[in-house]
Amino acid sequence: MQRLGDFRLPPFFNYPPYFTLQPVRETREKQVQLWKDLILEYCRSQKIHTISLEEDFPLFSNPKIERSLSHEAKEVFLAALVSEGRAEWMDKGHKRCLILWLRIQDWANLIINFVKDNGLEVMTIEEIRSGIDTRGTELEGIERSVLMRALRQLEQKGKAAIFKGTSADDEGVKFSV
């Protein structure tokens, strides 16, 4: 089994036709599903939140079989994730994509469960993203925009109150659990 760092790649990664958009609808649907799953699993395992179509991304080429995805194929696979709410284009030109390996609601649930499990009431935004309590959890390194959207969702449900201090470092949240 081929690996990319500590990530184990699926068998299809060594099958050259999967690096070319397939013309037969049923085959393409299977291909798109395999790539969507691979992108989400890889991004989650590596804590990658954004993919740029203009920069090299390790999944999009396989030197072992001398294959790379075309720009069109990359865009098709990412657009499929966008259509399912698992990604969002970050610009109008579709050059950068925010990968949501967890949906915003799932992030909100993760946050509230983390707070409950750890008996926390107040945290700064930066503590959630990079504090001692979140080290080694899925919250560590969370994309700030994703975190803020999840916290706003919790705020709308009455489970959190976001407050601003005098600087960005002072932004925080009080949880009601």
Image (cartoon, helix red, strand yellow):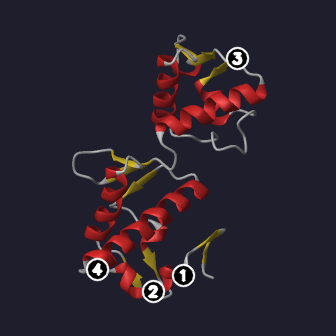
Which residue position is annotated with label 1? 11
In the image, taking residue 95 as reference, residue 146 lies left or right, namely right
Which residue position is annotated with label 4? 22
Residue at figure coordinates x 54%, y 14% from the top left: 158
How far, Cα to Cα, is label 4 from label 1? 17 Å
Q: Are marks 2 and 3 in contact (CB under 8 Å)?
A: no
Q: Are marks 1 and 2 in contact (CB under 8 Å)?
A: yes
Give residue 84's mark. none
Which residue position is annotated with label 3? 121
97 or 157, nearer to the observer = 157
Which residue position is annotated with label 2? 15
Residue 70: percent from left, percent from top? 30, 74
Residue at figure coordinates x 75%, y 34% from the top left: 132
Residue at figure coordinates x 73%, y 21% from the top left: 120
> Which element type, helix, strand or loop, lies under badge 2?
loop
Residue 29: percent from left, percent from top? 33, 70
How far, Cα to Cα, is label 2 from label 4? 13 Å
